[in-house]
Amino acid sequence: MHGTRFSVAAAALVLLAATGAAGAATGNVLTVLTHSSFSASKGVIAAFEAEAGAKVRFVEGGDAGETLGKAILSRGNPIADVVFGIDNTFLGRALAADILEPLEVPIPATIPAALRLDASGRLAPIDVGYVCLNADRAWFARRGLALPETLEDLALPAYKGLLVVEDPAASSPGLAFLLATVARFGETGPRPWQRWWEDLRANDVLVASDWSDAYYNQFSATGSGRRPLVVSYATSPAAELFYAADPKPAEPPTVALPLDAAFRQVEFAGVLRGTRQPDLARHFVAFLLSRRFQEDIPLQMWVHPADAAARLPDLFTRFAAVPRSPVGFDPSLVDARRDAWIREWTRIVVK
Amino acid sequence: MRRGLAGRAAAGLAPLAFLGLFLFYPLARVLALGLGPLAAGGWAALAAASRDADLGGLLAGSGLQALASTAISLALGVPTAWVFARCEFPGRRALAAVLAVPFVLPAVVVAAAFTALGVPRGLGAVLAAHVFYNVSVVARIVGTSWATLDPRLGEAARLLGAPRGPRLAALTLRLLAPAIAAAGLLVFCYCFTSFGIILLLGGPGAATLETEIWRQAVRLADFGAAGLLALVQLAVTAVLMALYARLQRRLSAAMRQVPAAAARRRAPAGAAGTWQRVAVAVFGYGAAALVAVPLAAIVAGSLATPGGVGVGAWTSLFRNATGSLFWTSPLAAARSSLAFAAGALVAALAVGLPAAYAAAGAARREGRRPTGAGALLDLAVLLPLGTSAITLGFGFLVALDRPPIDLRASPLLVPIAHALVALPLVTRSLAGPIAALDPRLGEAAAALGAGRARAWRAVDLPVLGRAIASAAVFAFTVSIGEFAASSLLARPEFATIPVVIYTRLGTPGALNRGQAFAMSAVLMIVCALGVAAIERLRGRGAPGTEVL
């Protein structure tokens, strides 16, 4: 009937464009699969394009978990040549799924050993974030309450109802913080990690579904929230200052707490197995490790560069200190125990 | 005659080809991938997986929540539909546009607005948000039927001595029952498969099948459990559709519809009775006010600064502060959103209109119990309602992966996915009015020598104008508010307004929060303007008809 011609025309158009898109995907275009938090300066990417004589096309796969899921599902016939954004909580899964080529890219000596978590040589550490508590400075000043110094403090009556955390079942920083507490308290002994979370539940800890919800809806420093303590990143106060509304304050409204539990979240890049341009892909990973890209990382992604020798912006040296002794984790242990820990946490804190 | 048959077959085949390629095939591929290994373990493995995923609890919990959400949405939406379809009052058009806005808002924005308003989390917040989203869906679908009900029915009932109040209401409800059932079904399915609102406003532990599918597939990489839950959700939806189809056949009375212009006998405000004035106050102004409060909270959020009120978030919207390659200006985002919405609108109508005709034709030919291809097509276009977004996104990835159809990273997938999501709304808006068309009029026009297209324009279009506009508004709003990045591969250079909102909310800082709210306000404005433009276009295409 009336719509028939439309449908046929639409179908023809779709097929035409599809073949066109397939044709354009090859040639000198490098496709990079990233999570949606990836960012880089225009000039930096343009420099790589000029140097490599290729165009870089980015596709975003959602959050870190969704991005990895898409890389795994397209195994063998990959949607991209390079994947960026697999972190150390997903590293075991990525390696087990066998989606990566051997890297054969030298890792700069100035990248600390603690970040080189893939012994099989398929993933290169690119950046590192530290998940830790952030506090609303003005709130604590108004109440005349001291900032908490240890995790145990958070279970004290003085800090009742002040903390919001993310659900580790649905959120990367939430999982990172849970792992930090598992490492800090251990799984055995008189006070294992479960005991601390039981105490926290009794002390009215609030669970938000993800970082945006915790930080923007529940945290008192950023909007309508009422909780002055939130699980976020060591760099969040620096970003708060950078993105403060006018008139800009001299110092950030928040502070990252030097508590005894921070999780070191390392993000990796690798070459996807089945790429038709492995050399160009390796070239791009080498570029991610170069000084130029490493020094672009802080203000673009609000995490630290993996390379300890990369120069940090003033904002970072002043307001984004690296926590004293961050917790790292053997990725294979995380992979083996993650689901069990999340289930147990859910039973203790939510159910 | 043969040409007519061929035309009918083509009308049914084109939508089937679209659904086959972009819905059934990707779903089959991804479900087989997930369920294959699980099914190899036999029934015991499936039963164990269902137990592990707490399938029973999920079904009961989501079902009750969706039932309550639907009941409240209908209770508010049906009177609202009457007020907007049958009463004349100052500001009617503007308020109708306001009512359409919630539908396009991403869950994260609605959750932020509700939180800013101090709504405590839990089932209450979920119900409130679902009603906030769906009152306009009910009002639009029921209102579309109401506006073309022949008012002479009421006059006839009065002439025959029926008491004015209750019996007329009962008669009207009886005639509107198919539209109310259709609206109820759609709302139930939306709430049953709700995702963002459940995660953000449900509080810890709140879940639906949809949130569990996402959690299993994305967080736990358990594609078996995810596939099982996705299949169950699809099956529940299919059963609901079948029940609905039976109910629909029982309910559909011999209702002939008339062009909206002829039906429109709006009582002017001055001549209205007391009850009507109360109804307009409660369901016209009241409903709009209820919807407007969270919208106002969003605008307020864009103007809030630590020091009071300021426009910093708005002025900084246009500044790429870090020179990022991934930064999107509001204009570019609006352009992408509008381009995708236009594509989705064309595709959804191109598929939905012939599908609705094919289904209606089958029903007419096969009497009251259509069983053939037309009836199947009628059900098939509703299946996207039960399809989880992450399943479809992963399905595109594994199914559309070889030339000539390697669409995995193509921006074309966005309007295609949006058209799929919009199809149930589009076909439900069109089904009732098309079924009520008098085929003899078309035959008469043909007998008088009018070509098919001309006969369609002269006979069908005037009656269907309102329904087509409704369908177009649905396709447009579905597309403009859809956050496709979570299920598809997103291309940063084509970032839409919702994608920009999510990006801003991913970085700390007062300006980012303010910009997310400001972009939400932009989204509201683009939505309202788009809806108004579609309604105006319709007004020009079919003279004599009016805006909802």
Image (cartoon, rainbow, N blue to C red):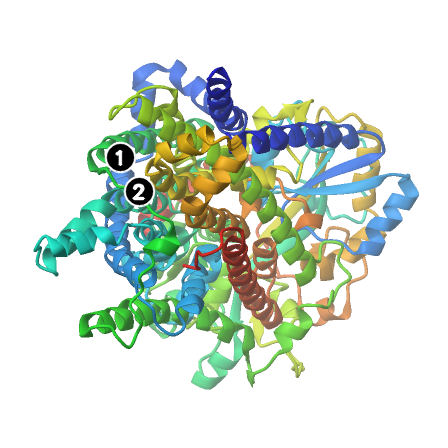
Question: How many numbered marks, from 0 up?
Answer: 2
Q: Quadrant of residue B161?
A: bottom left
> SS at mark 2?
helix
Residue A243: x, y in percent?
A: 65, 71
State left or right for residue B252 relative to residue B518. Answer: left
Residue type marked 2? Ala
Bin the neighbour count of mark 2 within 10 Å (Cα to Cα): few under 14, some 14-19, many 20 and up. Answer: many
> SS at mark 1?
helix
Residue B534, compared with residue A82, is above or below; it is: below
Residue type marked 1? Tyr
Q: Chain of mark 1?
A: B
State left or right for residue A80 relative to residue A211. Answer: right
Residue A139: x, y in percent?
A: 47, 80
Residue B312: x, y in percent?
A: 64, 77
Q: B288 or A3: nearer the eye?
A: A3
The tag on residue B291 is: none
Mark 1 = which residue? Answer: B244
Q: Are marks 1 and 2 on the same chain?
A: yes
Q: Are marks 1 and 2 in contact (CB under 8 Å)?
A: yes
Q: Chain of mark 2?
A: B
Mark 2 = which residue? Answer: B182
